[in-house]
Image (cartoon, helix red, strand yellow):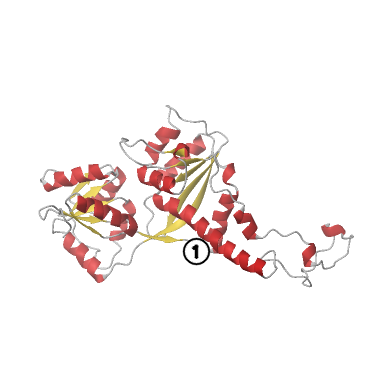
Amino acid sequence: MFEGEDTKAPRVLVTRPALDARHWVQSLQQNGFLAEALPLIEIAPLTTAADAEALEQVWHTIDSYSALMFVSSHAVSHFFGEKEAAAQSIRARLGACRALGIDSEKEPQRGQFLPDLQAHSPAMGQKAGEKWTAAALLQPMFPKSDRLLAIKDIATTVRFLAPGPGTATALRAAGVPQGQIDAPPPDAAQFDSDALWQVIGGQEGGRDWAGRRVLIVRGHGDGAVRTDSPGRDWLARQWIAAGATVDFLSVYERRTPQWSPAQISRAQNAAADGSVWLFSSSEAVANLGLQPGIKGIDWHQSRAIATHPRIAQAARAAGWGVVVESRPALDDIVMCLRSIESGCP
């Protein structure tokens, strides 16, 4: 048992992704609750060449955007982390090439020839009707590694937008200056796209988005459940209505986790043992029903805290008997747990 835990306090099941859940479990335990992680969303990097190229293209053109909006701390870590990992790998390969006297890892060596050029091509003064090969070293070549090394880490003209304090903290940790970050104030009623729009596009203090480019950095689901996009779609529509162009970039994947038999058994028991489920995503509620042995469980005796009205609606639709809405801040969640503990949710 964690020091300070109250054995009479309700056990809290934290359903956030594993890394986030670890932090929340520790914080709740420090507040005297019996908390454990039961992740219902798995976060994984994107691994295809097309994903890497899309990310690199954004870094090449980052100055063309007026704002980058990050949907979560995971979007921040993968946007900056994958770029740095790719840069380190390419630097290593480029160093090996140059150690061998080669200027580019992709550069053909002397004596190699490019494929035949088409007739009537203006390349290198080709005469009409001629068809011939050109020596490789006469062709201009710009290796990917050199391009990536020239990318600016942070463009000072770009605003970095966060829907809540967790994402804002991740941006600062990634090196974004506080003065370039826009986010809802700490005392906002909610941390979501609507609250962010009140800061950047509302009638009070909103900026002019006409003719601007905006990038929304996000993750994408595994296709089984798509429940968390309404807020992002709404925000994109606000920008478009204000005259902006909105692009999207996926930098990570959200998956339904494959639970162990022990986790499945724990969830089955939690349906009626008084545990309190902490839901921070509608997708987590939906993923619970996809786990083996969970479908068909009666949740009417179950209790949950939902950190957004849409999440609360999803939990009630799934059959939860008691659902309490809370701001997604630790102090507010602790207060909700205390109220549930006292029997007055």
Is 307 on the left-hand or right-hand side of 222?
left
Q: Position of residue 80 (x, y in %)?
A: 48, 53
Q: Position of residue 153 (x, y in %)?
A: 54, 48
Location of residue 206 with respect to 64 vertically, above or below: above
Residue at mark 1: 47
Q: Nearer the viewer, residue 165 or 275?
A: 165
The residue shown at (43%, 59%) is 253
For the residue labelled by badge 1, is the local secondary structure a helix, a strand or a loop?
A: loop
Q: Nearer the viewer, residue 217 or 227?
A: 217
What quarter of the picture does the N terminus occupy?
bottom left
Is residue 71 visible to us here? no
Is residue 50 visible to us here? yes
Looking at the rendering, which quadrant does residue 118 occupy?
A: bottom right
The residue shown at (12%, 43%) is 344
Q: Position of residue 106 (x, y in %)?
A: 67, 66
The residue shown at (37%, 50%) is 228
What quarter of the picture does the C terminus occupy?
top left
Residue type, mark 1 in image: Thr
Q: Nearer the viewer, residue 228 or 146?
A: 146
Q: Position of residue 56 (x, y in %)?
A: 57, 55
Decide: few, some or many residues near mark 1? Use Cα within 10 Å; few <14, some 14-19, many ≥20.
Answer: few
The residue shown at (39%, 54%) is 226
Is 181 on the left-hand or right-hand side of 337?
right
